[in-house]
């Protein structure tokens, strides 16, 4: 039985990059496995819905191509998840294609265990009918009506499918949507290490060197896990971890700094100790796992909302800047009149940068108007052609819209670009961000072995 | 004094697509305590600022590093058609203007 596990988290997000030196330094010591988190819901629902990654393929290729050969030479597993940014089948397959490309260029041969996490809509319909789907993290109550609009619904699996894939002897594990912690906690849990510590270490590791100073989601982190503690150290000598930097990391994008939840249960950090260990490392102990009382699985899915078109324009004329409400009102009326008979199914939005585009109408209006303002007009409609048409009407109306005391009667807007209008493509919303009660049902996420 | 001026870090970010977290970090304990004890700094007052219900606002002190976390529901899911801030990284106002 292993006394210690030492692993490398390549970087905070596959494709964000890392220093070559970090890799060299990490490989100067023993390594049991390499992991990298490749998924996030942070860039919004578009990426899950469309099947496109938010990190570009050439970035992903760079990050994989430096490390793959070295992992294979060491004969240590390399675990990637949630592949392609959102972990649905198109994301996983695009990462697999990149692995194949690198294999051909570097003449590598290896076995990949591919684990998909896509959900069938019929499965969701049944789960909804059995009232198994409930809100989490502030999501609204689940509306079964959205199922038909869902694109790429996935489940976030935990450590079990990755452990099974590790046991199958795969060199590379390419996981679809999974818990970020599963990428780093599966190997230690498989080797009998305490799940609480393994998950806490994984939670820090999945962000790469984000827990270090200077912070770096674009750099590596080395974790040494023991039975009663773990030590984290950035392999890049320019960075260091301190007890405060590591403790502060538990605040990041989390609703609670003292605990977090995984399928295994609640990871309780109230009694965690963070101690400096040498110049640049921190040792953590005391984290406990409070096992979950019921088995749940997190589900994610993006619902299609239509297509987007936008235009960007500036205003300098002071009366025009003061008349944005009147302009918007006039444009809405003009569009409504002229689009009749073409479509009534559209949404128009006016974002007034310099005035209230960011905070919305939460704050009282600022009595001091800016010297210049930017206006982004957005149209969303069922097809791109309709969105373009609505936007085009709105743009021409806004340019010439009259309002009281107007002096600049030749045009209200300064367009920086020709063409002035841009396609935003398909628009989605996170309509599935819920927990499913798994009592009495099982979902199998079986790895498919691919020889490259 | 405004909360934004007391804290040395005042930042917001998504905590998932339906919640925002505002982290307020203080360089000295007196400020941290003053904010936590202030009658202006309550879920009810914060809920008014963000047009939500007090029971959906959570204040979580993290004494170890003199930080207070405030969790607020998003008015619109991240990146949905009505959202204005996909990452939620500019939503620490109006909270930053709160007078302590």
Image (cartoon, rainbow, N blue to C red):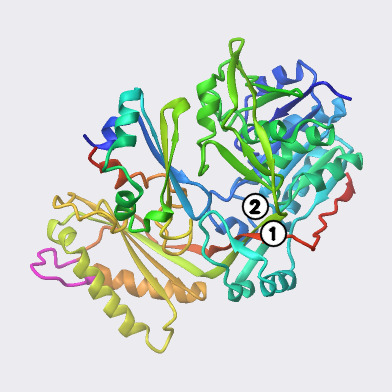
Which residue is tagged 2?
Answer: A86
User: Which residue does the image show at 51% across and 54% down from the upper left?
Assistant: B17
In the rendered image, residue A407 lying in the magenta stretch gets the answer: yes
User: Which residue does the image show at 59% across and 33% down from the upper left?
Assistant: A269
- Image depth: mark 1 or mark 2 in front: 1
Q: Which residues are magenta?
A: A400-410
User: Which residue does the image show at 57% across and 72% down from the upper left?
Assistant: A143
> Could you tell me how far apart the alpha carbons at marks 1 and 2 are, in whole angstroms?
9 Å
| Percent position of residue A29, x then y | 77, 16
Give A235 or A162, whichever is nearer the viewer.
Answer: A162
Please, what secondary structure does the residue beneath circle 1 have? strand
Is residue A420 visible in the rendered image? The answer is no
Q: Earlier in the sequence, mark 1 or mark 2?
A: 2
User: Which residue does the image show at 60% across and 36% down from the upper left?
Assistant: A16
Instruction: Name the image quarter holding residue A240.
Output: top right
| Contact flag, marks 1 and 2 (Cβ < 8 Å) | yes
Q: Quadrant of the N terminus of chain A?
A: top right
Give A64 or A288, whichever is nearer the viewer.
Answer: A288
Local crowd size for mark 1, using a 10 Å CA cut-off: few (<14), some (14–19), many (≥20): many
């Amino acid at each position: 039985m292993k006394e210690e596990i030492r692993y490398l988290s390549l970087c905070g997000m596959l494709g964000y990059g890392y220093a070559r030196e970090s890799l060299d330094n990490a490989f100067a010591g023993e390594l049991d496995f390499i992991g990298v988190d490749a998924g996030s819901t942070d860039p919004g629902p578009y990426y899950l819905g469309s099947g496109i990654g938010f990190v570009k393929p050439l970035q992903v290729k760079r990050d994989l191509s430096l490390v793959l050969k070295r992992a294979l030479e060491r004969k240590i597993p390399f675990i990637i998840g949630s592949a392609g940014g959102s972990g649905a089948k198109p994301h996983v397959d695009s990462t697999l294609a990149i692995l194949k490309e690198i294999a051909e260029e570097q003449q590598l041969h290896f076995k990949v265990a591919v684990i998909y996490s896509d959900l069938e809509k019929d499965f969701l319909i049944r789960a909804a009918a059995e009232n198994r789907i409930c809100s989490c993290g502030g999501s609204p109550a689940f509306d079964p009506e959205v199922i038909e609009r869902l694109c790429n619904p996935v489940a976030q699996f935990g450590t079990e499918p990755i452990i099974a894939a590790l046991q199958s002897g795969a060199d590379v594990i390419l996981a679809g949507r999974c818990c970020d912690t599963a990428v780093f906690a599966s190997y230690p849990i498989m080797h009998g290490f305490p799940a609480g510590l393994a998950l806490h270490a994984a939670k820090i590791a999945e962000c790469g060197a984000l827990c270090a100073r200077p912070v770096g989601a674009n750099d590596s982190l080395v974790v040494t896990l023991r039975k009663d503690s773990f030590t984290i150290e950035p392999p890049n000598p320019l960075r260091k971890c301190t007890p405060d930097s590591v403790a502060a990391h538990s605040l990041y994008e989390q609703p609670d700094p003292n605990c977090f939840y995984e399928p295994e249960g609640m990871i309780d950090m109230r009694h965690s100790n963070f101690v400096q260990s040498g110049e640049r490392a921190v040792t953590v102990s005391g984290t406990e796992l409070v096992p979950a009382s019921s088995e749940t699985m997190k589900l994610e899915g993006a619902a299609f909302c239509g297509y987007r078109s936008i235009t960007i324009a500036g205003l300098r004329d002071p009366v025009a800047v003061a008349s944005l409400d009147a302009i918007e009102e006039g444009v809405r009326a003009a569009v409504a009149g002229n689009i009749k008979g073409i479509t009534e199914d559209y949404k128009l939005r006016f974002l007034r940068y310099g005035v209230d585009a960011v905070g919305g109408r939460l704050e009282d209006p600022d009595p001091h108007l800016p010297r210049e303002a930017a206006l982004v007009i957005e149209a969303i409609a069922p097809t791109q052609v309709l969105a373009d048409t609505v936007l085009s009407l709105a743009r021409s109306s806004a340019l010439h819209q009259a309002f009281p005391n107007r002096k600049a009667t030749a045009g209200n807007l300064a367009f920086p670009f020709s063409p002035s209008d841009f396609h935003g493509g398909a628009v989605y919303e996170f309509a599935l961000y819920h927990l499913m009660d798994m009592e009495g049902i099982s979902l199998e996420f079986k790895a498919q072995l691919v020889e490259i | 004094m405004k909360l934004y001026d007391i804290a040395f870090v005042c930042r917001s970010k998504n905590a998932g697509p339906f919640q925002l977290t505002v982290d307020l970090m203080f360089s000295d304990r007196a400020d941290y305590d003053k904010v936590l004890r202030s009658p202006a700094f309550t879920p009810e007052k914060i809920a008014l600022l963000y047009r939500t219900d007090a029971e959906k606002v959570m204040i979580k002190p993290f004494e170890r590093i003199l930080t207070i976390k405030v969790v607020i529901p998003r008015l619109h899911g991240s990146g949905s058609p009505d959202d204005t801030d996909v990452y939620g990284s500019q939503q620490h106002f109006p909270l930053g203007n709160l007078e302590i």
